[in-house]
């Protein structure tokens, strides 16, 4: 037993990617156990390892944590990425919930059936550029500080960078109207733990490829 | 003063939890003005209230348990959210789906938690957010099938116990701020104001 957190998921982003980002930003080494076929999921379910029969699941600190938000909350709190008090935490939580909403849209695009893809794409780009990014651009503009909340790195900064990079994969100039987000992106990408995570060979996962979608769906359905 | 604040926040979050979620989770925001902040995002609001009023456990590990349990009841209540907006035919399908998920995936978990530790509350030895959230989920599923707890003796006892906490009991009485089951007027209002939920399908 290594003492490192162990992540159980398929070898792709999905709902585990944000957790990988948080661990990486905190400088925490982690292991991964990949589900490759349905039997791998069934085995975990039969073992009683999955509280609600679902992944993501992270084994850490003697617990088998499930529920994406519960896992992310635990990691962020443990590694001081939640602000310094309740009010900062409230701000962070608000920002992060908006980010989860956008992340869900971006992440599920690859799994949409062909006849729904175009509409999904239009909707997610619209939400990114008209609902979410303007909010964070304004937050940065209003306080003029380097980080979204409280002048120190929090999960909000990490999760926003994750989102920006995902959105840019779909539209490379998506930050064209957001100069502060462009500078934010450069700044946060340069933080040593994050810079390392962005290099080839890290545990960061690539976007799902069309040819892998069927395989992933088979594991879960 | 404590009691009044307790009343206000329990009311606030149960209201948010049961009847405002469609608006907030769709991204068209319910908003709560609290402590000088205009808070949006249901989960952020609920977390703030729970932490402020000591309903979030005593340490990080209890908090993790609460978050996990609340995640489960959130998912379950999520299946019920879109129910009012479904066609009559899809409603029957969804009703069956909700009951199946409740009785095979979610209720057994909480039944086992209560059975294994034999305590009155889900986490630790005190009342937490997880307990309120589970009670709310139970009541919502019972609205779809009134005897849904028949295989779950621990949950039946839990329901009775939590319902009789004075502030909760008060909230469950007529005239409180708890919102009624969505009806056609609700559907029409939500569609008109938010301009969404026109084309909702069953799970």
Image (cartoon, coloured by chain):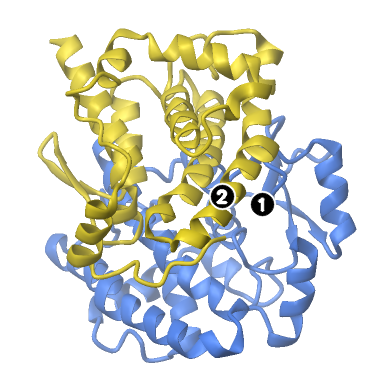
Chain colours: A blue, B yellow
Q: Are marks 1 and 2 in contact (CB under 8 Å)?
A: yes
- Element under disc 2: helix
Q: CA distance from mark 1 to mark 2?
A: 6 Å
**Tag of residue A56:** 1
Residue, x 66% and y 52% (percent of image)?
A: A56
Q: Chain of mark 1?
A: A
Q: Is residue A13 above or below residue A22?
A: below
Q: Which residue was labeled with disc 2?
A: A68
Q: Quadrant of the N terminus of chain A?
A: top right
- Sequence-first disc among 1 and 2: 1
- Where does the image place residue B32, in percent across and percent down from the top left? 18, 42
Q: Chain of mark 2?
A: A
Residue, x 27% and y 24% (percent of image)?
A: B10
Q: Quadrant of residue B64?
A: top right
Does the image show residue A182? no
- Where does the image place residue B16, in percent across and percent down from the top left? 28, 40
> Callout 1 environment at 10 Å: few (<14), some (14 to 19), or many (20+)?
many
Q: Is residue B163 above or below residue A101?
A: above
- Where does the image place residue B179, in percent across and percent down from the top left? 25, 36
Total numbered circles: 2
- Where does the image place residue A55, in percent across and percent down from the top left? 69, 51
**Tag of residue B171:** none
Does the image show residue B23? yes
């Amino acid at each position: 037993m290594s003492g490192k957190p162990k992540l159980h998921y398929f070898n792709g982003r999905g709902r585990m990617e944000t957790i990988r980002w948080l661990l990486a930003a905190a400088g925490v080494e982690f292991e991964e156990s990949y589900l490759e076929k349905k039997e791998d999921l069934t085995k975990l379910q039969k073992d009683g390892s999955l509280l609600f029969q679902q992944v993501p699941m992270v084994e850490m600190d003697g617990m088998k944590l499930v529920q994406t938000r519960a896992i992310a909350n635990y990691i962020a709190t443990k590694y001081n990425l939640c602000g310094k008090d309740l009010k900062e935490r409230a701000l962070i939580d608000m920002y992060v919930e908006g980010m989860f909403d956008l992340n869900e849209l971006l992440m599920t695009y690859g799994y949409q059936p062909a006849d729904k893809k175009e509409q999904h794409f239009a909707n997610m780009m619209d939400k990114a550029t008209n609902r979410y990014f303007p909010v964070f651009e304004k937050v940065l503009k209003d306080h003029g500080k380097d980080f979204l909340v409280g002048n120190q790195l929090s999960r909000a900064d990490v999760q926003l960078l994750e989102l920006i990079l995902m959105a840019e994969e779909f539209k490379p100039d998506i930050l064209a109207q957001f100069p502060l987000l462009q500078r934010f992106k450069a700044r946060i990408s340069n933080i040593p733990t994050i810079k390392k995570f962005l290099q080839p060979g890290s545990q960061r996962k690539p976007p799902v490829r069309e040819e892998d979608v069927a395989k992933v769906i088979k594991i879960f359905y | 003063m404590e009691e009044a604040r307790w009343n206000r926040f329990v009311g606030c979050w149960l209201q948010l939890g049961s009847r405002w979620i469609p608006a907030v989770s769709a991204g068209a925001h319910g908003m709560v003005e609290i402590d000088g902040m205009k808070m949006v995002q249901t989960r952020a609001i609920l977390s703030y209230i729970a932490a402020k009023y000591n309903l979030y456990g005593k340490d990080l590990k209890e908090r993790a348990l609460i978050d996990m349990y609340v995640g489960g009841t959130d998912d379950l209540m999520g299946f019920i959210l879109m129910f009012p907006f479904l066609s009559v035919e899809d409603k029957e399908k969804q009703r069956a789906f909700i009951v199946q998920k409740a009785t095979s995936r979610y209720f057994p978990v909480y039944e086992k938690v209560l059975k294994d530790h034999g305590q009155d509350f889900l986490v630790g030895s005190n009342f937490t957010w997880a307990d309120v959230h589970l009670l709310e989920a139970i009541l919502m599923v019972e609205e779809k099938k009134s005897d849904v707890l028949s295989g779950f003796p621990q949950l039946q006892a839990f329901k009775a116990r939590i319902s009789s906490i004075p502030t909760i009991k008060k909230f469950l009485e007529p005239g409180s701020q708890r919102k009624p089951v969505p009806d056609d007027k609700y559907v029409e209002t939500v569609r008109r104001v938010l301009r969404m939920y026109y084309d909702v399908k069953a799970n």
